[in-house]
Amino acid sequence: MYSVLKTTRRWWIADKVSEYMKRIQIEGGRRLEGSVEIGGFKNSAVALIPATILAGGLCVIDNLPDISDVDKLSQILLNNGAKIKRQGNKTIEIDTSGIEKCYADYDMAKELRASYYLLGAGLGRFKKAKVIFPGGCSIGTRPIDQHIKGFEALGARVSIEHGIISVEAEKLVGAEIYLDVVTVGATINIMLAASMAEGVTTIENAAKEPHIVDAANFLNCMGAKIKGAGTDTIKIKGVDKLRGCEHSVIPDQIEAGTYMILAAATKGDVTITNIIPKHLEAITAKLKEMGVKITENGEMLRVEGNSAIKNINIKTLVYPGFPTDLQQPMTSLLSIANGTGTVTETIFEGRFKHVGELKRMGANIKVEGRIAVIQGVDKLSGAKVEATDLRAGAALMIAGLIAEGTTEIENAQYIERGYSFYREKLIKIGAKITEI
């Protein structure tokens, strides 16, 4: 018998994942109005699912986004012996008591950056793990040297042969680890491994993103002892054993920011619910600077666009600065703003691949190294374009919504990696979008 994981839109059968390519068609020029509910944070969910390995028991995760990355990670755990049950679209039960190893093969890991969290989780529970070198979106250099530095500081041996990363240790011992660069992935991976190490581990220059805090809260719910998450110094006191727990994923700040941008771009009036406004302060400040009206009311924001959007300058930074994941969607808005603006990308050097596609639609953008200079135009025109990664797909989707005529986006499956039910949500607020 094989295990089957059923979701609303896809079947995933153990040891077999079908490859697929999608195209969507958008009829632009429609003002969007209504309400959009934000789902769980993709960047948090892809860390919490591997973290369940540490529990060795039953974990229930609520407010989980129904996206392809979640499905692929769930399939990897199934292949390793976990039992998984979906309850509707938002809740998943994961029993990892049957897992005896941690391994992700090429077919499962080639398009999934977050597969590297299996290294930290496997190292913590089994003192060993193997993962094919992680894939994910092609947005520039994404080294894992800080992950390796952290594992080795804890006493693990790390080797990379034929594209396979192997980690192994007789035992893990707490250490003081200073990260040379601020990195979310390494911060979480070290937390996973250190949760079951002997003694105390200190991570200096740690990332401070909201999903760092969410991952720490999840681990603490499992019995870990982590303090300082959300600051640049995190301390982990190792424990002998962790247990299953229940946890609700925080709202997705990037999904929320994307809908804020598309509301402004379509001169719409959209209320965005199930959010944590503090996580959105950077994007809120920039949209207000452009002349967009934003009203906060508890766990919701109302975004009202207008025809007098001003061009501005943006520089991506680690949290709490402007997020790199919203740089591409924001470029679409800047392309129709009044005047000239700039976008400086400090995180990933390869994150301007969408610019060529926007220029096909009439955008006036020049890229010089890590800086894009954007001269606003009166309108964009529908065209056939291709998404090269997740956030590029979101940028082209926004451009299609504001363009005159019809836009066809190839490789739209990238969008499903981070935006659950995006077509249904957009149709609800007035968009005309169909899958071809």
Image (cartoon, rainbow, N blue to C red):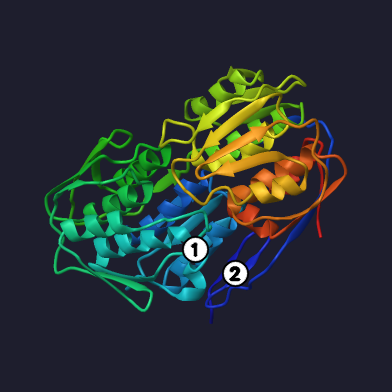
Residue 259 in the image, given as x and y percentages of width and height = 65, 35
Quadrant in the rendering for residue 431: top right
**Does the image show residue 157?**
yes
Disc 1 is placed on an element classified as helix
At label 1, the amino acid type is Ser
Question: In the image shown, does 144 or 175 lie closer to the viewer?
Answer: 144
Residue topped by disc 1: 74
- Give residue 214's mark: none
Q: Are marks 2 and 1 in contact (CB under 8 Å)?
A: yes
Question: In the image shown, does 411 or 78 lie closer to the viewer?
Answer: 411
Q: Is residue 174 above or below residue 17?
A: above
> Image point 60% across, 35% down: which residue?
373
Question: In the image shown, does 337 or 167 lie closer to the viewer?
Answer: 337
Question: In the image shown, does 155 or 73 lie closer to the viewer?
Answer: 155
Residue topped by disc 2: 12
**Which image quarter is the C terminus in?**
bottom right
Residue 184 in the image, given as x and y percentages of width and height = 37, 46
At label 2, the amino acid type is Trp
